[in-house]
Image: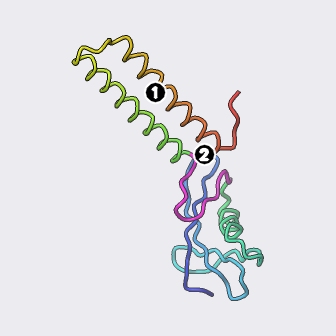
Amino acid sequence: MSDEVQTWRVVDEAGLVHAARITRGDRGEWIGVDPWGRSHAVTHADGLARRGALGVAELNHWTVAEILPPGVPTRAEFVAKVAEAVENEREARLNDIVARDVMDVDPTEATIAAAEAAERALAEATAATNALLGTVPP
């Protein structure tokens, strides 16, 4: 058995995130490892680490919604980051409107321009989210 242990994340249908620790066996198979270092759930010997994580999920009776390799955000994390970016952009646009208003720029024109820019940013964020989730807007 390899000394390298990978921690994949398994998101269940309730949105809970579980750690699925796996290591490569002597024949190339992936093996689930519990927190105490004991091996469980010998999985397929096809070399796919994702199947090792799935084996851990099945062993623990987790209802799988997502299986994520180390470092990859969950869909919920990605959507939250997009929402934060959209909110930051909106706040920046509002600050720009206030600054223009103070400088005697036509507030109606500035408001329309800022609203259009915010709408474009939201459309781009929505498209990126849909691409990640594999969905198509209605």
Q: Which residues are magenta?
A: 64-75
In the rendered image, residue 8 lying in the magenta stretch gets the answer no
Tell us which disc is closer to us: 2 or 1: 1
Asked whether 125 or 36 is in front, the reply is 125
* N-term-proximal mark, 2 vs 1: 2
Neighbours of disc 1 within 10 Å: few (<14), some (14-19), many (20+):
many
User: Residue 85: horizontal and vertical position, in percent?
Assistant: 43, 39
Q: How many numbered marks does the figure carry? A: 2
Q: Which residue is mark 1?
A: 118
Residues at circles 2 and 1 in contact by the CB criterion of under 8 Å: no
The residue sitting at 36% across, 17% down in the picture is: 110
The residue sitting at 33% across, 12% down in the picture is: 107
Residue 126 as seen in the image, left or right of residue 102: right
* Amino acid under disc 2: Ala
Q: Which residue is mark 2?
A: 14
The residue sitting at 66% across, 77% down in the picture is: 31
